[in-house]
Each structure stands twice: as C-alpha cells, then as structure tokens.
Amino acid sequence: MKAKGFARRSITTHWLINGVGVIIAVLLIIEVLLIVSIRSYYYSSVRQYLSSKMNVITGSILNEKDQTVNYNSEIRSLVAGYADKDKIELMAINSTGEVDITSSGFKPIEKEFADLENAKNSANGSGYEVYRTSTGEKVLAFTSVFSVRGCEYEALRMIVSLSEIDRKVLSFAVIITLIGVLIILIVFFSGMFFIKGIVHPVIEIGDVARQYAKGDFSKRLEKQTNDELGELCDSINYMADELSNTEAMKNEFISSVSHELRTPLTAIKGWSETMMSIDDRETFVKGMRVITSETERLSQMVEELLDFSRIQDGRLYLQKSKMDILAELGETVLIYQQRAKALGITLNYYEPEMLPFIYGDRNRLRQVFINIVDNAIKYSDKGDTVSVEAYQQGDRIVVSVSDTGIGISKEDLPKVKQKFFKSNQTRRGSGIGLAVADEIVQMHGGSLDIRSEENVGTTVIMELPFIDEGNSASGNEKNVNVEIISTENNEI
C-alpha cells in the first residue's frame, strides 16, 4: 500500500536522481571551470606576449636620443617592415584615431576601437580587447598610446588571431568532456551493478514478507552475501522460524484449550443431567463435588487466559504490600493435599520457622505457587513425590518445588516458559501458566528457573528479593510431611 501523498519511486530512480544527477552536475561545473581557466590562461599568455612585444617597439622609439629623428618616418618604416607580420599585425594609429598604416597593407573596416579607448583610460597607457572581425575571426587587439612631440601618431596597435588558441581550448574541452563521460559511465555501471545486488534481494525480501503476512511461513530467503543484506536475510529467516513455531504452538494451544474446555463442560453437563433424573442423595453430593471441581478448573483456565491477555497488552498491574510468603505458600500446599491424595502422590512441605517479609502482590504470588505446584502434580504419576521447600539464600528467598515425575526433554526444556508451549500433550493444561508465572516473578524483581531430566523429575526454583529489616531465618526448620496415599486415581 502506497503512503498517502507519496508516489512510488524505485531505488534505482532515487539513485539516478540523487547520486548520478549530483555527480553529473559536479562534473559539469568542474568542466566549465577548467575550460574557462584554460582559456583565460591562454588569452592571458597572448596578452602578456603582445605587451612584451609592444614594450620593445615603443621603447625603441621613445628612447631615441637623436633630436633630428623623424618619428613619423620611423614609425611608418617600423610598421611596414615588421618582422612578425605573418603572426601579428602591427598598426599605427594617428591623432584622429584612424589607422594610417598596417604591416599587412590592409586597413581594418572598423573605425572605432575599444582597445584604444581602454588604453587612453588606463594608467599605464595600454589596453586590450577580444572581439570578432567583420570576417567572423576572433582576435585579440593590444594597443599602447604614447606622446612624442612632432609625431602625428598617438598609438601602436597589435592584432593576433585567437583561432589556434580556441582550437586548443576546444581540444582540451573535448578531452575533459570525454573524461567526464567516462567517469559517469564507470559510476553508472558500477552503481547499477551495486543497485542490482541490493534491489533484487530487496524485491525478493518484499515478496517473502508478503507471504509471511498472509500466514505462509514455508519459504526461506537464500543468503548470498555476508554483508548487511545477508544479516537481514538471517534475521527474516529467524523471524519466520519463530513465527512458524508460534503459529504451530498457537494452533496447538487452541486445540488444547478447546479440549480442556470441552472436558469439564462435558462433565458438568453430564452430571447436571444425571442429577436432574435421580433422587439419590449420595449421587447428588458426588455430582455437585464434580461440578464444583470442574467449575474451579474452568475458572482457573479463564483467569490464566485473562492474565496472559493483560501481559500481552501491558495491562497486568501488581498490588504490592508487605507480606509473609510462607502464609501463601502454606495455603497453596493445603489446597493441593486432597488432589495429591486422590492421585496417590506424596506431597512433602519443608517449612522454615521464619523468613523475611517481601514486598509483593500476595494474590499474584499465590497464583504462581498454585501454578507451579499444580504442574508438579500434573506431570507426576501415582507413587511419585512432590516436595515443596522455602529458605533464605543470601539476599533472596528461594522457593523450590520438585517432583519425581515424567520430567522434560532437553529439547523442550528451553521452551517451557514460552507462551502456548506444552512439553507433553497428554497432560491437561493450556500451556500459558508458566509464561504468566515467569512474568509475574520478573515483575517482582525475581527469577524463575526450571531444571529437569526426562523420566527423572523436574525442579522449579523461584527466587525473590526480601525486605531487609535486620531479620533472618532462624535456620531451624519445621518438617511438615504431608504424605497421603490413595488407591483411587480419580481427581476430586
């Protein structure tokens, strides 16, 4: 979708306008400056050459010591017999401003000369002008004025053609232009090769990203270079793997939650229908017990889903206060005594005499304890043992819940705290309980660590900072062994 107010332009177009366009502009400016500088240098050299020649001629006339010399005759003779007349035309200008005699024998058509006026207005008595003759030839005229008593001439004028110089300047301009064109071609083709190496992968990345947006995570980008584009391909491939795994876990989660919801709903519906059709008090009590149990189970699942939604949206807030962690932990153990008894699992609780207070949300921490103990019982079988222990270690309170159940494989262990993940699909649960518990513990400034070995058991270690009030655990422990063995394997 195009951004409003912006027309789509390719990277190549941007590069041609912003890159090559700037280079061309810079090269044109440099070329113009070079050509102007070269022409100015040559014109200045010609002007200096004519000035030196004129100084020699005028010097020989003005420095003449013989008072009987006829200056008019001398100037005519000098102009008529000028040795360099093949290259330079020498003219004598009389007091009326007209050319009286030239070294070529041809008088110019022009009647007024700007170089003569420049010479008259100059402090050193010399002036020059570049112009085109009536034949279209570009020339440089250099005039030097002088004043000699009894002489009818007031200035000498030299004219030299600039055609050869212009041809040289043009040759330099062609060479500079060719060099500029060569530079532009090199920049263009090297840039197009570079752009091709960027645009094509970017187009491919865009196509793959659009497939990902549609939910198809099957395609992967091929890493062709070890530069930033290669790193981008790796990042996108990693993102696709994570999205694919998340999608699979989400689908599994939906399936698992659907099953988890259907089971208690089926039990509630079945027992409700049964209770409506019988008149037996014992069966009625048993049915109500099952309905109550399954309703609590549904309520817990819904609460987990709501907490997970709050965590995702950043709306999970804690109501912290000074609290005794042992009270909440002990109450959790008492809650699961009957369940452990029904399943034939030994539940041991090692409670210390005293632990420092912590600053936390008692309801949320109890939710964490319930989740961890529930998981320990859930993933244990008849005859297994679940042990709950709390103690002080350094500046932390440690709560350890271990079991001798089925354990977690090495492949699944790093993922158990991820949302939607379930290491064993045969056990009940939504797969988000540990993710919520881990988030709550982190919000209390603590940590949740899980250690497990398949077919050996699992230990969950939760650490929380306590309020330092100069109190410490007494070191004396009260061993509360809740060991209830039941031959029934039905959950009540």
Image (tube, grey):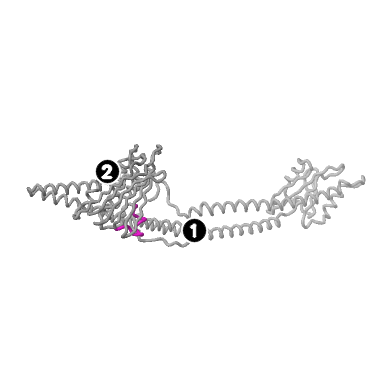
Is residue 188 at all visible to an observer of this figure?
A: yes
Q: Which residues are magenta?
A: 406-417
If you read the primary sequence from the N terminus, does the residue marked by circle 1 or circle 2 appear first? 1
- Graded by Cα atoms within 10 Å as few (under 14), some (14 to 19) or many (20 or more), the crowding at tag 1 reads few
- Residue drawn at 71 percent across, 54 percent down: 162
Left or right side of 458 for 91: right
**The one of 173 and 99 positioned closer to us in this rendering:** 173
**The one of 283 and 164 positioned closer to us in this rendering:** 283
- Residue drawn at 29 percent across, 42 percent down: 328
- Residue tagged 2: 331
Q: Give the overall secondary structure of the magenta segment.
A: loop
Is 242 above or below relative to 327?
below
Where's residue 351, x and y in %?
31, 45
Where's residue 6, x and y in %?
42, 48
Magenta span contains residue 412? yes
Amino acid beneath label 1: Asp
Where's residue 401, x and y in %?
32, 50
- Residue tagged 1: 227
Which residue is at the far left? Answer: 279
Disc 2 secondary structure class: helix
- Residue drawn at 63 percent across, 57 percent down: 176
**The one of 89 and 455 positioned closer to us in this rendering:** 455
Amino acid beneath label 2: Glu
Left or right side of 372 for 66: right
Where's residue 292, x and y in %?
18, 46
